[in-house]
Amino acid sequence: MSSALILHHYPSSPFSEKIRLALGYKQLAWKSVIVPSVAPKPDVVALTGGYRRTPFLQVGADIYCDTALIFDVLEHLQPAPTLYPPHLKGVCRVFAQWADSSLFWAAMAYNLQPQGAAALFANLPPAAAQAFGEDRKAMSSGMQRLRPADATSAYRSYLRRIAHMVEEHDFLFGAEPCAADFAAYHPLWFTRHCVPVMAGILQATPAVLEWMDRMAALGHGRMEKFSAQDAITVAAGAEPLPVAGEAFQDDHGIALGSNVTVTAESFGLEPTEGELVAATRTRYTLRRTDPRAGTVHVHFPRIGYALKATP
């Protein structure tokens, strides 16, 4: 039970769709915990210690934050089919980082302009739309956000660039999907499936729609419903994986064993505090104890996150 993959997500979360499809591509079994789309998220914070972006992956008492790190975990657990083909290791990571940032924010600024937002919340009470807006405003505090007209222009250009790639191959870089495909797909999926009233922008690039159909056909793997309380019970009954012996890369002058915070560089700036027990070439690991979840290790990628010693 403790080694099961537990994905904490919600249906309309685009970054969650990125991971659901990767689970499908690798034909993995996983447990599905649905989390709230807005704060408060007490069951989330019991596991992450503060981080509340969606999704995150739980394996026993190990909590993996950020989809870039989750991809690395899935690749380690099941190397084939690979998300990182050897000849594309660098380029698909660089492309995925662009897609998860520049493409994502242009797409979402386009998707959630008034007509799209009205459609997204059409079947919910007005208070739900207001709560979502206030929550995302708080999470994006200090971020420079695109205006809808500028976002529309950028999104159109980005779609043409993706079309140029998938006119040549079934997937972005060849006959098989890689990490880049999943990262580029999820903001477009949101346009097509969550705010279909905005999906007309995709019609100018039929090759993109055909590629999206190929991506969707990968499916979501073997999913089983699971409760948040059961996930917390799993964490409480498990021991985090050992980190002793992992190579320590110190770029901050912060020793292992120090009390630290890790915070996203942009969007969702809630810090997670704990004891720094690993700082490898690619990630940080914090040990923290929660009254409900017990002792857990919370893992973050180095890229996109700031490590600071606590006073």
Image: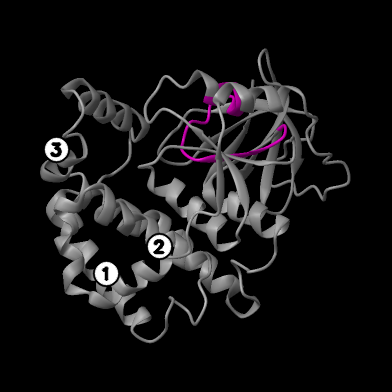
Identify the disc placed on residue 159.
1
Q: Is residue 235 visible?
A: yes
Q: Foreground residue, 254 or 115?
A: 115
Three-letter residue code for mark 1: Leu
- Dot in front, 3 or 2: 2
Examine the image and state in which quarter residue 275 appears.
top right
Q: Is residue 92 magenta?
A: no
Question: For the residue labelled by badge 2, is the local secondary structure a helix, a strand or a loop?
Answer: helix
* Magenta-tinted stretch: 44-61
Three-letter residue code for mark 3: Ala
Q: Foreground residue, 255 or 75?
A: 75
Question: Between marks 1 and 2, how big is the CA–CA gap?
Answer: 17 Å
Residue at label 2?
Answer: 216
Question: For the residue labelled by badge 3, is the local secondary structure a helix, a strand or a loop?
Answer: helix
**Residue at the bottom extreme, as displayed:** 168
Residue 252 position within the rendered picture, expressed as x and y whole percent measured from the top left: 68, 42
Question: For the residue labelled by badge 1, is the local secondary structure a helix, a strand or a loop?
Answer: helix
Residue 9 position within the rendered picture, expressed as x and y whole percent measured from the top left: 47, 38
Question: Between marks 3 and 2, how big is the CA–CA gap?
Answer: 25 Å
Screen quadrant of the N terminus: top right
**Mark closer to the chain start, 1 or 3:** 3
Residue 231 position within the rendered picture, expressed as x and y whole percent measured from the top left: 62, 28
Residue at label 3?
Answer: 118
- Dot 3, how many residues are within 10 Å of its Cα: few (below 14), some (14-19), or many (20+)? some
